[in-house]
Amino acid sequence: MNTDIANFICRRLVGRVAIVTGGAHGIGKAYAQRLSDEGAHVVIADIDGPAAETSAATLSARPGAGRSIGFRVDVSNEESLAHMVSNTIEAFGRIDILINNAAIFATIPMSRLPFDEISVDEWDRMMNVNLKGSWLAVRAVAPVMKAQRYGKIINIASGTAFKGTGGRIHYVTSKAGMLGLTKSLANDLGAYNINVNCLAPGSTLSEENATEEIKAMREGKANKRPLARTQLPEDLVGAMAFFCASDSDFVTGQTLVVDGGVYMH
Ligand SMILES: NC(=O)c1ccc[n+]([C@@H]2O[C@H](COP(=O)([O-])OP(=O)(O)OC[C@H]3O[C@@H](n4cnc5c(N)ncnc54)[C@H](O)[C@@H]3O)[C@@H](O)[C@H]2O)c1
């Protein structure tokens, strides 16, 4: 990010502890950086353990940043999530923010095929990571947040859930599930002063080392947007930070679509 702009970022999250699942690559990495810039201690919990460690070390080394740690977590595995919580508590003593961002999408790629050509195994894997993994991650952190009587949970859906995009039914269905998960959790956790909201990104050029084909696919979406340009990970971090900060203390159960105006609701 341009340093002049970075200098204007508020430090609304000083002392807060934030976990970003899938924070070692792509958009999750941008969320982690913004949380750190806002003063939070960041835990990068990603199935790619070495990349999580490297990203956390890079964040911690930034001037004025909070301390960050990163390690391997598989969000589809309860034991691994219990380890995520105990590691975080040991390092920082609390958990204020959970960004449920991990997914099978780009870094671990999904098949883009007609609905009847997706294998049952891939359907199950998609649901286990994207949807069940988010539910399990909330189950893991909720006792800590309830005891604190404070928490901000942000689920990551996708504009595809609203559009019903074809050619990836397992992914679209998992992301549509995030909309219901968000509302149901907001009802269950509101009494504990825990806000649960959702972000739905549009098609975002998040791929590291994107091929010309991927760039063309992402850039091709630009002319379908009222804000006619390619969406980048940085376009999502402001909305994410809003849901993490006290500015959104009376907002819960909501989904904010950040896609340059493709889907308006
Ligand atoms: N890029 C887009 O166009 C777009 C659009 C809408 C929504 N999204 C959503 O935004 C989020 C980030 O997308 P991205 O483009 O950065 O994709 P990405 O594939 O680069 O990021 C997903 C991250 O999750 C991690 N991960 C995968 N399985 C995991 C597991 N079992 N446990 C823990 N970590 C795991 C990956 O290693 C990766 O770091 C995803 O939830 C995605 O569905 C992306």
Image (cartoon, rainbow, N blue to C red):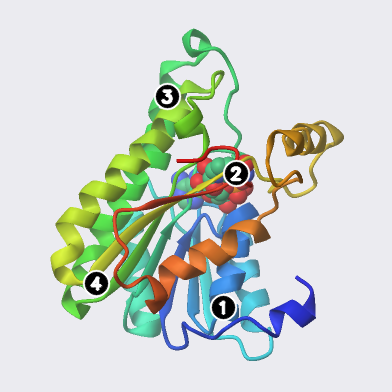
What secondary structure is marked by label 3?
A: helix
Judge depth for marks 2 and 1 and give the one in front.
2
Residue highlighted by disc 4: 145
Name the N-terminal-most of marks 1 and 3.
Answer: 1
The residue that label 1 is drawn on is 36
Question: Judging from the image, what secondary structure is the residue with disc 4 in?
Answer: helix
User: In front: 171, or 239?
Assistant: 239
Task: Give the total number of marks visible in the rendering.
Answer: 4
Mark 4 or mark 2: whose residue is earlier in sequence = 4
User: Measuring 29% from the left and 41% from the top, which residue is drawn there?
Assistant: 180
Q: CA distance from mark 4 to mark 2?
A: 34 Å
Q: Is residue 27 above or below residue 128?
A: below
Residue beneath the point at 46% across and 33% down: 162
- Near mark 1 (Cα within 10 A), the count class, few <14, some 14-19 or many ≥20, is many
- Mark 2 or mark 3: whose residue is earlier in sequence: 3
Residue 83: tell me if it is visible: yes
Mark 1 and mark 3: Cα distance apart in space: 34 Å
* Residue indicated by mark 2: 261
Residue type at mark 4 is: Met
Looking at the picture, how far across and down is residue 41, in whole percent? 48, 80
Where does label 3 land, which residue?
A: 123
